[in-house]
Image (cartoon, helix red, strand yellow):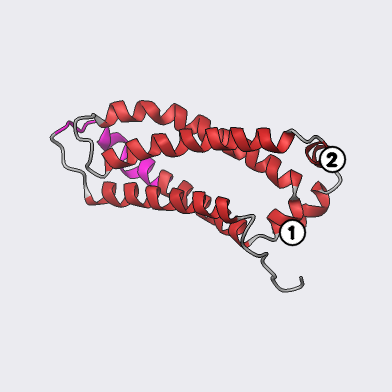
Amino acid sequence: MLQSLVPLVVDSALNQWIVSAWWVWPVLEIFHFIGLSLLLGGLLVIDLRLAGYFRILSPTSTHELLPLVLIGFALNMITGILFFYGDPVTYANSAAFQLKMVLIGVAGLNALLYYWKLHKLVHHWTADTDSTALAKVVAWTSLGVWTAVLLCGRLIPYIGTYSGAGN
């Protein structure tokens, strides 16, 4: 699937700009790191509270971090797309990148599970409310999957490329 995007991206104006301007890639890296910090920093507090820790904090107050988490996700999505445009062949053929995309999908499904099953309940919790088993599963899944996304992203330059059928 990703390989089919390569011909559309290679030699596009955006690809040429990213490749030719020496400063673009480092600036993208900086913004990607800021996005990652907002995303994972906010989720760390939210998910640990959802898992039953930081009980001094109300779940409603931890959810005030959600706008920062969403800003971080948006920054990472935009810079990630620009990274793909900057080196489409490497990214399209990277096993680490492909796994990262699958894991982001899993994180999205986990977020939907939270929204469908827990969102309304959590807002009625007090400091004395015990986390439900489902809340703990959603929280630890979120933390584990986003940690794996981080690791896969970091490994993209170091892990060999995927050589699927026809390559």
> On the rendered structure, is 69 left or right of 45?
right
Instruction: Report if residue 123 lies within the magenta region.
Output: yes
Residue count near mark 1 (Cα–Cα under 10 Å), binned few <14, some 14–19, many ≥20: some
Give the CA separation, mark 2 to mark 1: 19 Å
Query: Which image quarter: residue 64?
Result: top left
Judge from the rendering whether residue 2 lies leftward or rightward of residue 103; answer left or right: right
At numbered mark 2, what does the secondary structure look like: helix, strand or loop? helix
Going 85% across and 38% down the picture, which residue do you hit? 13
Look at the picture and state if 73 lies above or below 134: above
- Residue in the picture at 23% in, 36% down: 54
Residue nearer the viewer, 151 or 22 = 22
Amino acid residing under circle 2? Gln
User: How many marks overall?
Assistant: 2
Q: Where does the image place residue 27, in percent across and percent down from the top left?
A: 67, 32
Residue 16's disc number: 2
On the image, the x and y values in percent for residue 42 come to: 40, 34
Q: Is residue 29 above or below residue 2?
A: above
Horizontal arrangement in the rendering, residue 31 relative to residue 112 (left or right): right
156 or 69, nearer to the observer: 156
In the rendered image, residue 16, in percent from the top left (x then y), is placed at: 84, 40
Q: Which residues make up the magenta segment?
A: 112-127
Q: What element carries label 1?
A: helix
Q: Earlier in the sequence, mark 2 or mark 1?
A: 1
Q: Which of marks 2 and 1 is in front?
A: 2
Q: Which residue carries the number 1 mark?
A: 3
